[in-house]
Image: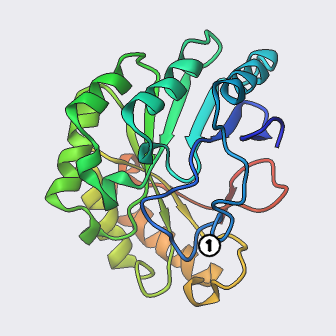
Amino acid sequence: SKVKGLKQRFPDRVLVMTSETCFANCRYCTRRGILGKTPIVETPSDLQKCVDYVKSRKRVRDVLLSGGDVLTLPDEKVARFVDAFAILPQVDVVRICTRALSTNPERITDRLVKMLSKSRKVWVNTQFNCADELTPESVKAASMLVDSGIPVSCQTVLLKGVNDTPRKMLSLLKALSSARIRPYYVFMCDPVAGIDKFRVPLEKARKIEKYCAENIGGLSMPRFVQDLPGAKRKVPI
């Protein structure tokens, strides 16, 4: 943490904690058990301090709005966060990190999309873990964003019993591409206590990655990675 509600691990990007609430309380989540216990940006003064911090670090070009989930907030508060950073000339990307597309796609409204597309800097990062989650409502929500010029990417978590076979993973990647959602990362489970039942062995993950790479084009092929404490990058498996 650098200032209240802002974290920086990499030199070109920062994470801004906007909310204590998420659309899903995933048992395998890195932040499982800390929601409500980690400082978030609550006041205009808090937000201004985050903006000042970014302005003082000219290498920062990417701002992630997360929490919790920024889209659990009203449109007006979402706009306040987006506009505060999008207006900075050094910032090229403002990332909305949200589970709304898979868990509450009705949250993606015409009003919200119009607001998010205004700056031409917003990207949406979401999470789908199996093809069945790509319901017609989810596909429609993604289409609304993409049609308005907002790129949508997916960060999947490799989970035992959910998507840990080559065919299940390939099915997900095809469904994402069909919905114009870029398969971005497939993460090994983070080193979080109490989630051993979800962990997939590294060698099995490598076999899944190899199968997918041999059976789908590069545009639909995510990077399979580990997010290791202290590492300077997402580490390829």
Tell which residue pokes out farthest to the top in this image: 89
The residue at 58%/90% (across/down) is 197
Q: How is the image coloured?
A: rainbow
Q: Where 141 sits versus 171, above or below? A: above
Q: Dividing the picture into quarters, in which one does residue 119 lie?
A: top left
Where does the image place residue 81, in percent across and percent down from the top left? 54, 28
Specify whether 14 is left or right of 109: right
Q: Nearer the viewer, residue 95 or 217?
A: 95
Q: Where 102 sits versus 73, above or below? A: below
Q: Nearer the viewer, residue 42 or 32?
A: 42
Where does the image place residue 124, in percent across and percent down from the top left? 42, 39
The residue at 72%/55% (across/down) is 38
Q: Where 76 sits versus 192, above or below? A: above
Q: Quadrant of the C terminus?
A: bottom right
Where does the image place residue 177, in percent across and percent down from the top left? 28, 51
Where does the image place residue 2, in percent across and percent down from the top left? 84, 37
The residue at 71%/60% (across/down) is 37
Q: Dividing the picture into quarters, in which one does residue 66 lie?
A: top right
Q: Nearer the viewer, residue 47 or 138?
A: 47
The residue at 55%/53% (across/down) is 68
Q: Quadrant of the N terminus?
A: top right
| Residue type pointed to by label 1 | Cys
Residue labelled with disc 1: 189
Dot 1, crowdedness within 10 Å: few (<14), some or many (≥20)?
A: many
